[in-house]
Image (spheres, rainbow, N blue to C red):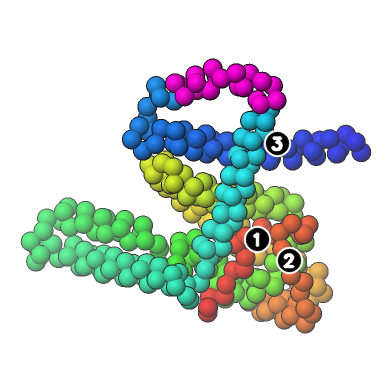
Amino acid sequence: MSGFLAELGTKIADRWVNLLVLPGLLWTAALAVGLRLGQEHPFDVARSRMWLDQIAAQRTSHDTATVLLAAAAILLASAAAGLAASALGGLLQRLWTLPGDLPPAAWLLRFRQRHWKRATTQLKTAIARAAHPDHNHHEPAQAARRVRRAQRRRARLGPAWPPRPTRVGDRFHAAATRIREHNGLDLNLVWPRLWTVLPDTLRGDLTAAQDAYAAAARLAAWGVLYLGLAALVGITVLLTAVVRVRGSADVLADLVETAVDLYTKDLAATLDLPAASEVAGLGQAVSERLRATPAPHYQPGTGVPAPLLPPPPMAPAGD
């Protein structure tokens, strides 16, 4: 038992260091250097070296107690920065899935929809001109290039009319909509029970996808924190995070749809429900059966694996 606890403590410490302390230490170092060099000399290595030499020359810097206190303070500051980034990452996951009913999410949704509509109009115009290049005084190759550019422009804004303020929200909304319309399931109600019949392999894949999604959100949070220190670094980190967030959200949503498609029958059998010829009919029977009794409220950290938390819950398409 003592060996198990020691191993558990080691894993927790390693995770704490990797997720909080090391990224926080880098940010704390950047903060200290930024405060020392200021905006006028951000890349002056000589000033940084001179500052470090001054610290090393002080008598107190060789005192063991002073060194230990300074190291403890740096570790605590790094951990605090890591906790702030983790909390901000969780908040970002919530914000990405807002329905866009209230400002400022509603403003962002209208902005995305206007741009998507404009890009779609431009694409249709380019296709129409490419169909009759002679009438529009264009070379066929030039018209085809314009169509490809318009397609890429529209693809950057999303594959379809944006129903949510963000691309991540669009993806989870599409997954919830498909599950309700094709499978007849209320995902928020069914998911905790469905998790119990999933095989360990799929559970592991879902958990890994959720971890990747959360890690991408934390990276975006670090980008926000770095914006206050170095705009170029912060923008670079944010752009990297955007790519990772979209990819991890796609993987997570795909895995959730896979779990629903493959194991709804197993859940129905566990609930002693008769087999149905239609997928939607079976899903509706499962949802109605589960609505008969109040469902407990599941939250992260309660011991119930919930890969969709966060971002919970997947809002119905009719929202």
Q: Type of residue at label 2?
A: Tyr
- The stretch in magenta equals 49-67
Q: State the separation of the CA atoms marked 3 and 2.
A: 27 Å
Does residue 214 belong to the magenta stretch? no
Q: Which mark is residue 281?
A: none
In the rendering, at what x and y percent does residue 275 appear? 74, 75
Q: Are marks 2 and 1 in contact (CB under 8 Å)?
A: yes
Q: Nearer the viewer, mark 3 or mark 2?
A: 3
**Disc nearest the viewer among 3 and 1:** 3
Compared to 71, does 162 lie above or below? below
Q: Give the answer, above or below, for where 3 lies relative to 52.
A: below
Which residue does the image show at 54% across and 52% down from the upper left?
217
Give me the C-alpha separation between circle 2 and circle 1: 9 Å
Measured as percent of width and height from the top left, residue 189 is found at: 69, 73
Kindly report the distance in space between the C-alpha atoms of the residues bearing marks 3 and 1. Answer: 23 Å
Please identify the quarter of the rendering in which residue 273 is found: bottom right
In the picture, the disc for residue 309 is 1
Q: Secondary structure at mark 1?
A: loop
* Residue with the mark numbered 3: 14
Q: Secondary structure at mark 2?
A: loop
Q: Choose between 203 and 64: the one closer to the eye.
A: 64
